[in-house]
């Protein structure tokens, strides 16, 4: 996959003629045509940085991680907790916020996990349950 969303397919080899095909989608909407922000200015507003983190193309690709991981670390954990808890955000963005909290900030606190468990959106509750398996935040000790 390329940074613009193109799919590259290699065929042939082992004594046959090899070819690489590029498959690309001609987007119909402005949202789909919008290029990935490969670099934001350092003075970009936090809301723009948060959006770049919550709406990356291919978030697990190394070139994409090179963009959103530094942005996420510079923003800190709080905006992602707020996004995960925001019932007004699209489900995909809330789930992405949970994924970033797990990937970059050690998971969800007990308080955030309990709040997400009560979400009206089943997919968000599922993502919260998924996050438990990757939890590295220290848990309170029972005394």
Image (cartoon, grey):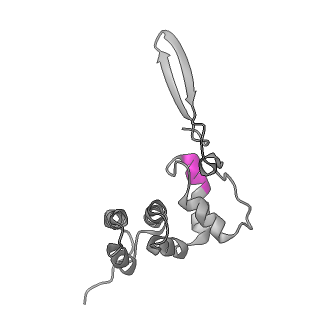
* Residue at the image point whose x is 60% and y is 47% from the top: 29
Q: In x, y percent, where is residue 77?
A: 52, 73
Q: In x, y percent, where is residue 143?
A: 25, 90
In the picture, the quarter occupied by the N terminus is top right
For the stretch drawn in magenta, the main secondary structure is helix
- Quarter of the view holding residue 119: bottom left
Among all residues in the image, which is located at the extreme top?
15
Image side of residue 1 versus residue 98, left or right = right
- Quarter of the view holding residue 68: bottom right
**Which residue range is magenta in the image?**
62-67
Q: Relative to residue 86, is residue 122 depicted above or below?
A: above
Front in this rendered view, residue 80 or 35: 35
Q: In x, y percent, where is residue 18?
A: 53, 16
* Residue at the image point whose x is 40% and y is 77% from the top: 112
* Residue at the image point whose x is 48% and y is 71% from the top: 88
Q: In x, y percent, where is residue 86?
A: 47, 74
Among all residues in the image, which is located at the extreme bottom?
143
């Amino acid at each position: 996959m390329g940074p613009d969303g193109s799919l590259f397919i290699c065929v042939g080899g082992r004594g046959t003629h090899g070819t690489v095909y590029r498959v690309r989608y001609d987007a119909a909407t402005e949202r789909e045509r919008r290029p990935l922000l490969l670099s934001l200015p350092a003075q970009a507003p936090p809301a723009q940085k948060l959006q770049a983190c919550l709406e990356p193309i291919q978030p697990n690709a190394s070139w994409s991680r090179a963009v959103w991981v530094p942005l996420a670390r510079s923003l800190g954990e709080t905006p992602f907790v707020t996004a995960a808890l925001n019932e007004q955000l699209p489900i995909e963005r809330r789930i992405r916020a949970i994924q970033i909290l797990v990937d970059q900030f050690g998971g969800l606190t007990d308080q955030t996990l309990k709040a997400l468990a009560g979400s009206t959106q089943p997919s968000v509750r599922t993502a919260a349950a998924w996050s438990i398996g990757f939890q590295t935040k220290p848990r309170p000790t029972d005394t």
